[in-house]
Image: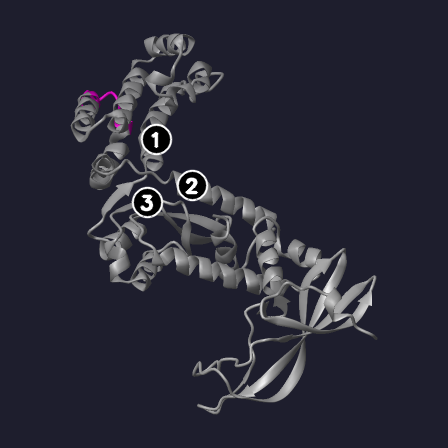
Amino acid sequence: MASDVMSVRLWLPCIKVLGVVADAPERLAVRVASTVSRPRCCDCGTPGGRCYDRREQKIRDLGVSGRPVLLLWVRRRMVCDVCGRRFLEDHRAFEGKVTARVARRLVADARLMPVNAVAGRHKAGWHTVMALVAAYAGLVARHRRRRRCRVLLVDETSIRKRHRYVTVLVNGDTGEVLAMVPHRSSQALSAFLAAQGHKWCRGVKVVVSDGSRAYKAAIDQRLGHARHVLDRFHVIRWFGAGLTAVRRDVQRRPEGSKPAFDRDVFRARFLLMRRPDKLDAADQARLDALFAAHPRLKAAWDALGELHGLYLAKDPKGAMAALDRFADIYSTGLIPEFSDTVDTFLAWHTEILAWHHTARPSNGRIDRTNNLLQVLRRTAHGFTSYTNFEARGILLT
C-alpha cells in the first residue's frame, strides 16, 4: 500500500521510518531501520564492518489511539573487519522483542500488578515480562550494592509459609533492598558478604539482626569489625516472655475449680505488657487491684519495667542502672520464670547493650519491607522461584 512516511513520528532515537506497511483501525505496522552507519562489533567493540544480509524483526511498541503498533526493524547482519566475527546489529531503542519504552512500562506495571496481569494487559508473554523485570532488577541491585552501606539490616521472610525462606538484606540508611538470598543459614549470608568484597564489607559499621545464631556466625566471620546490634523488637519479646510465664502460673486455679483460671488475670494479659508511662489512671487502678491480690504479678511487672529501662535510658550508664534494679527484683526469688530471660540476656548481652553505643538502630525498615513482600506474595498467588521473588522484591523499594 502507499506509505506516507512523514505522517509517522515514532520519536525513537537514531531510528528512521522506511514506510508504513499497514494502517488499519485494528493495527499499525511500520518498517524502520537504524541511522547508525557503523554498528559496533559485539565481540571486540570495533565500529564498522560489512553488511552481508538484512532481516526483518518484529518489535512491539506502545499503542497509538488504542491501536497496537508493530515495528518491522530491518536489522543488518554484519561481519567485523578486525576479528572476523559475524554479529547482529543492536540498538539502544530496542530490548529484545519490544522497544525500550515498552520495557519500562512493563517493569513499572509489574511493581504494582502480578506478572500475569501485566502480560494480559499488554498482550505480551509471561516469560517476556518476567525476563525484563529480572534484567531491570539485576541492574538496580548492582547499582545499590556499589554504593557504601554503613548500616546493614538482616532478617528473614518466607517465600512459602513455614516452608521456604529467604534472607533479606536492606541498607539501613536508605531503606533499599540490597539482595534476597535463598535460605536463612550462615552459609547463605556469608556467601553474599564474601561476594561483595572486602572493601564493601569494611564500609559496614553497624549490623542489625534478630536473635539468629546462624546470622551471628556469619556476621562474626565476615563483619567482625562492625558493631552487631540485636533488634529491639525481638529483645523486648524475649523480656515479655518472662512476665507471660508468671501470669500463666498465677492465673491457674486448683484442679477441679470452675473456671480453671482467674478471669481477671487472663483479661489483663495485654494490659500487663504495656509500659508504666503508657497507662492512664483507669488502667493503673485496674492493675493496682490486680497486684494487691497477686504480689508475684506485681514483681514480674516491675521486673519487665526495669528491662524496658534498658532502652528508655539515655546512655549506657542509665541502662546498667536499670539492669541492676532488675537484678535486685530477680534476686528476691519471687519470679523464677525469668530464668530463661536471664540466660538469654547473658548470651546476647554484648549485642543488646551495643544499642546505646550506636545511633540506636532498629530493623523497622526491614520489617516494613517484609510486610510489603508478604503482600506481594499474596498478590502473585505465591512464588516457586527464588530468583523471581528476589527480582520482584527488589523493585518494591
Circle 2 sits on which residue? 367
Q: Residue at x 20, y 40 (%)?
A: 350
**Residue 172: x %, y % from top left:** 35, 44
Few, some or many residues within 10 Å of mark 2 (<14, 14–19, 20+) = some
**For the residue marked with disc 2, what is the amino acid?**
Asp
Left or right position of 187 against 92:
left
Q: Where 222 falls versus 112 (above or below)?
A: below
Q: Which stretch appears magenta?
A: 329-337
Left or right position of 341 against 104:
left
**For the residue marked with disc 1, what is the amino acid?**
Ala
State yes or no: residue 331 in magenta: yes
Dot 1 falls on a residue whose secondary structure is helix
Circle 3 sits on which residue? 209
Circle 1 sits on which residue? 241
Left or right position of 297 against 29:
left
**Residue 330: x %, y % from top left:** 21, 24
**Residue 73: x %, y % from top left:** 66, 75
**Among numbered discs 1 and 3, the one appearing first in the sequence:** 3
**Dividing the picture into quarters, in which one does residue 255 lie?**
top left
The reply to whether residue 163 is visible in this rendering is no
* 269 or 258, nearer to the observer: 269
Alpha carbon of mark 2 to alpha carbon of mark 1: how far?
21 Å
Q: Are marks 2 and 1 in contact (CB under 8 Å)?
A: no
Q: Residue 185 shows which numbered tag?
A: none
The reply to whether residue 3 is visible in this rendering is yes
Q: Residue at x 66, y 83 (%)?
A: 55
**Among numbered discs 2 and 3, the one appearing first in the sequence:** 3
**Residue 81: x %, y % from top left:** 48, 91
Q: Residue at x 58, y 64 (%)?
A: 100
